[in-house]
Amino acid sequence: MDRMDFVQGVTRTRVLETRLLSRTRIDRMIEARDIDEVLKVLNETEYSNSLAGITRGEEYEKVLSNELNRVYELMREITKDQIVVDILALKYDYHNLKVMIKEKEANKDLSDLYVSLGTTDYKDIKSEFLHGNLNGIKPEFKDAIEAVLKDLEETKDPQRIDIIMDRYYYEHLYNMAKETKIDLFINYVKDMIDFINIKSSIRLKKQGKDIRFFEDVILPNGNIDKETILFTLNDNIDNMILKFKNSKISSGLIKGLESYKETNRLTDLEKYMDDYLMELNKPSKYIHFGPEPIFSYIVAKETEIKTLRIIMVSKLNNLSPDVIRERVRDLYV
Amino acid sequence: MFKIAVVGDKDSVLAFKALGVDVFTVFDGDEARRTVDTIARDNYGIIFITEQIASLIPDTIDRYDKEIIPAVILIPSNQGTLNIGMNRINENVEKAVGSNIL
């Protein structure tokens, strides 16, 4: 990847960065009386185009997906090398694959669940899949589909669709990041895998699953090796904190585990994971030649949209501003 | 075989989907009235409806009181209860046994 290819893209991204929502705007939305007032604040920002034609607060999902579509389209236009966007878009491909297989298994129409943001058009994959012609599909997707179908035949357990798909997804994602040879991308993926593995450990402990199941769920390619993660299945949270004190992701992880210990809510760990990954992206602000700012801008935008979703859902359910503030993510700016 | 439906705002009723109940999300009274009338005709034996939505369409709810099928049952939403559902049960008990034994 030639870093000079991104000079113009970075310049354009710099301008877009200034339009990201500021802390004060977010605060105003958190303090807003109801969701309509949130939309009013949003109308003063770059979201105004995505808001066109939306009259009811309950339609907030449409606003957010309009905006996400707009961002992805724009970034694909700006970047010289599509792989920068593809790394972040890949999750939508695998989401679509899951929907596609479940649609076929349950014999139900789930067409409103597809997301059109992936690296490949899901309609093409779906039509090939329904014609039984897997050879026309990208080899990574093909392998994943075949593995899922084979497992489904043996176990008949729909939960395993997600488990196997996720494993193939993170494998694919890691290979993509490695291919770019950009440190930020590799670290982003590796650190995320660590967080997810630890989250799985906590979740499975709660469900009382055995180590065999855990071995299936655990993802390779993280910084923390598989054995260490496997051994945490019997640890309590204090032991886990002690064990991961010196790991690479400890700055976010320890905070997350401590607040999980207090509240018993896994969403707390998720919040600190997002904050940590955001922190990882912040140095991109000082890079002028290279793909990092474009990647980080998309991450910033996705986090912003997640924040808005939290605020809007909370407003619809009359949660107090303090409760919302606890859940809101760190911003890029 | 009769089916079971639940009507209400998305956040209150979506979880019912996991139980195999058919979920219908509605936003306002008009939509609620139309949804309830449609599903009542559509072979549903029990319709659960959140109190918040039910309070917007009292006439429709009353109408189904006189029908045997479907049974329209009021449930609290995630915002807490308005006590309409419980009051209705009390009324029905009073009607049936002559005094409020609950």
Image (spheres, helix red, strand yellow):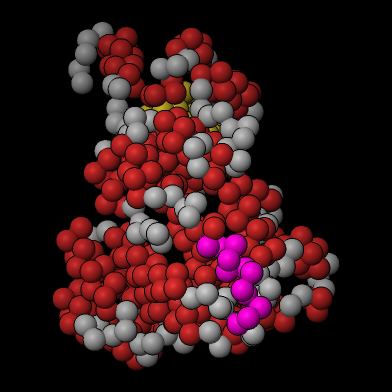
Residue at 50% from the left image edge and 58% from the top image edge: A17
Does residue A99 show up? no
Q: Is any part of residue A188 visible from this angle?
A: yes
Segment tinted magenta in the rendering:
A3-14
Q: Residue at x 56, y 88 (%)?
A: A181
Q: Quadrant of residue A125?
A: bottom right
Question: Is residue A100 located in the magenta-colored stretch of the structure?
Answer: no
- x then y, percent, for residue A68: 58, 53
Q: Quadrant of residue A171?
A: bottom right
Q: Is residue A212 left or right of residue A241?
A: right
Residue at the spot x=31%, y=65% of the render?
A272
Above/below status of A228 relative to B43? below
Vertical placement of residue A28 versus A150, above or below: above
Residue A51 appears at what percent x and percent y?
Answer: 57, 37
Which percent across, then down, holds residue A23?
35, 50
Along the line of sight, the residue nearer the viewer: A174 or A203: A174
Percent position (x, y) of residue A279?
36, 70
Q: Tell me if residue A44 comes above or below residue A263 in the rendering.
A: above
Q: What is the magenta segment's predominant secondary structure?
A: helix
Q: Residue at x 54, y 45 (%)?
A: A46
Camera-side residue of A270 and A302: A302
Q: Classify the position of the C terminus of chain A by image quarter.
A: bottom left
Q: Nearer the viewer, residue B17 or A55?
A: A55
